[in-house]
């Protein structure tokens, strides 16, 4: 009982934020998980009520509340549509940290976050070995999408269709860069991100090629670490702080006007969560704020800063676009990626529910794959119904999950990052 009282006291620290929820139910209308289950505990209003119950010591089932708290994609759709302006994502991230402090981090998550992510050299070495031997355990199922499946029953992989680790990661292709500003007079830093480095290095290459052709100098430091969102989402603030400090050390050694990423999640994490959630050395706070203020999605940079504009349709490619949650809901970036698609000379067609979550949600996809698959299947149907031959997006995690869904349906539709389409158009222009 004493431990529960201590837990209740910790949640009372969130009191001011919890009571701001008016229980209006607007979150029900937009929550992708609730749309599948219809359970009140799966929607934001229900989760906030459970947290409030713990804070007021009206509930004793802390484990049950923790399980329900983790049945969330963290897509931010509820927060973006909340008429009361409740900072739902902040509440959930803080609540997960409290729960992790109470229950402790599982052995598996300790190994992943504190053993691997917090040690980038080890993480890179292990994934490098994985890339060499993965052919023994996987087989290709769709050449166009590059998707594979497991040769044998594997608990974590299941029956997924997945993109395998790249034979050569981006950190080997481009170990580091430090080029001066060219015709643009602008110099940027480039944050690679784990999925781009290890699975989609061609996306990173496309971004760097476009920046070079636009006369933009690039500072790409070696030995970058994870942005920290996997650890933070699991309540592991200690690892999150360590990763932020590592990246801060890498990027504060260079001078640049903007920090760019090709990952929606990395962009929103650096820009929104690093300043709000970092609890490490207070001396880092000013540098974190400066870096966050410079952070931009690459499409946003190319359109808003360099002035990339639409061009008449120049190729036969028909493209639709999926809005990543962390760009649309967290940062309000929706128009710029669509401009980039049209600037690449593609025919753009809007699909139904373009801004709805694809169902990935990082670790949600691992823990609740059946739900993730149902949400993703609806996204895949909307993509197919658009009548296009290419799905473009701005998030490598979305690319992974949508590839899984389209591969299962044998849809014959490519999955591309927006910057790949634009880089291809620049090559074709000579």
Image: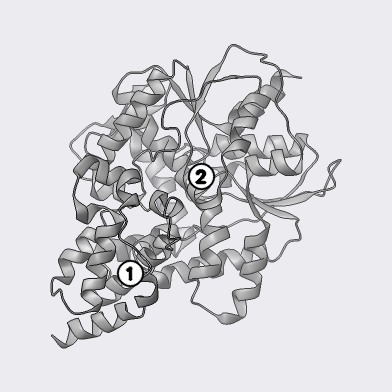
The residue closer to the viewer here, 132 or 233, is: 233
* Picture coordinates of residue 10, whole percent (x, y): 31, 81
Q: Could you say whether the residue bearing mark 2 is in a helix, strand or loop?
A: helix
The disc, 2 or 1, on the residue closer to the chain's N-terminal end is 1
Give the farthest residue toward the bottom.
2
Tell me the residue at 71%/21% (across/down).
311
Q: Is residue 144 visible?
A: yes
Give the farthest residue toward the top.
316
Residue 328 numbered mark, or none: 2
Query: Measured along the vertical axis of the image, is residue 178 above or below residue 352?
Result: below
Could you tell me which quadrant the C terminus lies in? Answer: top right
* Picture coordinates of residue 231, whole percent (x, y): 39, 62
Q: Are marks 2 and 1 in contact (CB under 8 Å)?
A: no
Tell me the residue at 64%/31% (across/down).
340
Q: Is residue 148 visible?
A: no
Q: In this view, does 90 lie to the left or right of 409?
A: right
* Picture coordinates of residue 75, whole percent (x, y): 40, 49
Which quadrant would residue 286 be assigned to in this image?
A: bottom right
Which quadrant would residue 165 be assigned to in this image?
A: top left
Q: Distance between the residues labelled 2 and 1?
A: 24 Å
Residue marked by disc 1: 95
Tell me the residue at 39%/18% (across/down).
385
Could you tell me which quadrant the N terminus lies in? Answer: bottom left
Count how many numbered circles sit on residues in the image. Answer: 2
Tell me the residue at 45%/64% (across/down).
119
């Amino acid at each position: 009982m004493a431990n529960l009282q201590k837990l209740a006291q910790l949640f009372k620290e969130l009191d001011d934020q919890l009571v701001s929820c008016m229980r209006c139910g607007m979150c029900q209308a937009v929550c992708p998980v609730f749309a599948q289950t219809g359970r009140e505990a799966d929607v934001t209003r229900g989760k906030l009520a459970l947290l409030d119950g713990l804070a007021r010591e009206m509930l004793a089932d802390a484990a049950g509340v923790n399980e329900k708290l983790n049945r969330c994609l963290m897509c931010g759709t509820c927060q973006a549509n909340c008429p009361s302006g409740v900072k739902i994502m902040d509440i959930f991230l803080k609540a997960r940290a409290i729960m992790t402090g109470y229950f402790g981090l599982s052995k598996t998550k300790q190994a992943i976050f504190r053993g691997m992510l917090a040690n980038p050299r080890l993480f890179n070495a292990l994934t490098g070995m994985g890339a060499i031997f993965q052919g023994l355990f996987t087989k290709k199922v769709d050449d166009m999408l590059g998707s594979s499946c497991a040769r044998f029953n594997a608990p974590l992989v299941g029956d997924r269709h997945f993109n395998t680790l790249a034979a050569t990661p981006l950190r080997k292709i481009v170990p580091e860069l430090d080029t001066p500003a060219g015709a643009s007079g602008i110099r940027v830093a480039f944050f690679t991100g784990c999925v781009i480095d290890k699975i989609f290095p061609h996306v990173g290459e496309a971004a760097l090629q476009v920046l070079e052709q636009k006369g933009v100098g690039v500072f790409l430091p070696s030995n970058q670490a994870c942005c920290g969102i996997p650890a933070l989402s699991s309540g592991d603030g200690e690892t999150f702080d360590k990763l932020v400090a590592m990246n801060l050390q890498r990027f504060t050694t260079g001078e640049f006007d903007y920090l760019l990423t090709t990952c929606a999640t990395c962009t929103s994490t650096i820009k929104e969560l690093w300043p709000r959630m970092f609890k490490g050395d207070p001396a880092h706070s000013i540098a974190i704020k400066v870096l966050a203020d410079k952070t931009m999605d690459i499409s946003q940079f190319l359109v808003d800063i360099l002035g990339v504009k639409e061009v008449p349709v120049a190729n036969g490619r028909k493209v639709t676009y999926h809005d990543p949650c962390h760009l649309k809901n967290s940062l309000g970036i929706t128009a710029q990626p669509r401009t980039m698609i049209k600037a690449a000379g593609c025919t753009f067609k809007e699909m139904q529910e373009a801004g709805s979550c694809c169902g990935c949600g990082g670790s949600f996809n691992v823990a609740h794959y059946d739900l993730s698959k149902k949400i993703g299947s609806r996204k895949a149907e909307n993509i197919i119904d658009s009548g296009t031959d290419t799905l473009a997006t701005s998030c490598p995690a979305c690319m992974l999950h949508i590839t899984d869904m389209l591969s299962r349906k044998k849809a014959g539709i490519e999955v591309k990052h927006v910057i790949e389409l634009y880089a291809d158009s620049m090559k074709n222009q000579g």
